[in-house]
Image (cartoon, rainbow, N blue to C red):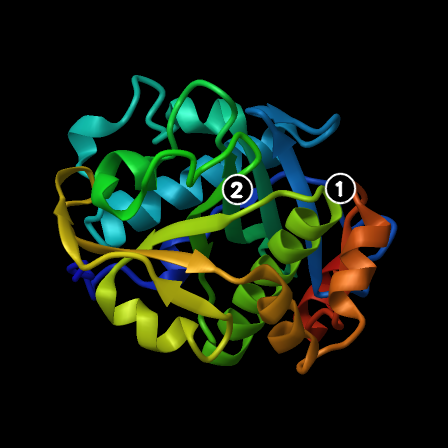
Amino acid sequence: MSHIDRSITNHQVIPVVQSDLFEAEPASRLACGLLAVNGVPLPGFEDEYRAHFDLRRRVYVDQTGQLDASELNEDGTDRDDDDARSVTFAVFENHEEGVRVVGVARLIVRGDTVPLPVEEFCPESFGPGDVTASCVEVSRVIARHETAVLQDVIQYHLFAMMLAYISKHQHERTFAIIEPWLERHLVGVLAIQRIGEPTYVEHYLDYNLPIEVDIPASIDKVNTRNSDSIDGYRAAEPALTYFGRASRGTLRNRAA
């Protein structure tokens, strides 16, 4: 499993970005939605997109060691070729320190020419024609917060956003590569099944497990927690959706 550096706290890995995302909703705690498509940030989200790479690097390189620092680009990001064919989502927090990037995820859309990472790393899991151009892979899912309850909420919204997008845009099969220990957690949140056995993936410096996500069944699971969230994300796209109430400290700072 990933080797978490306990000396690096969640607070330390969460980037703060100069942003006006909460100007229209100053009392809201979270803002969730699309951040970029095919490696291009939505208009006005350029700084937020850059900051989401900061979160990815701080978690995958500094905190968990899932990526080696030698794999970073010259600009210090873990941006790879898959970002150019991905839909990227983010969760932002209205915090007394500023706007924080507390959750990110991406859906890699296969397309006609380049296989998904799960096909490359776990080729024995697939036969001819099993994966089509509209299939997707869930990737780079990160939720970080100082409190476990809010971290769970952030993860929930990341999954809800992706399920809303996949179903709205009629993508076909949905895959992911996860660490084996994560399987037990995910079965309580999503409907997943193994499509292979754990195998060592050098790119991730660990053993990983290929899985498939049952989208209709996962939507049913997520809707048991909040029956309106997925429909709400479908209707709001590409606009942000706001949730919760900002802390008293945040509200005082905004009023000052």
At mark 2, the secondary structure is strand
Give the labeled residue for mark 2.
107
- Residue 234 image position (x, y, % from top left): 79, 52
Marks 1 and 2: in contact by CB < 8 Å? no
Left or right: residue 215 compared with residue 174: right
Which quarter of the rendered picture does the N terminus lie within? bottom left
Left or right: residue 43 compared with residue 118: right
Give the labeled residue for mark 1.
20
Q: Which numbered marker is on residue 7?
A: none
One can see residue 97 in this view: yes
Nearest the viewer among 43 and 220 is 220
- Residue 175 image position (x, y, % from top left): 43, 50
Separation (CA) of disc 2 from disc 1? 26 Å
Q: Amino acid at mark 1?
A: Asp
User: Residue at 57% across / 35% down in the picture?
Assistant: 134
Q: Is residue 55 above or below residue 96?
A: above
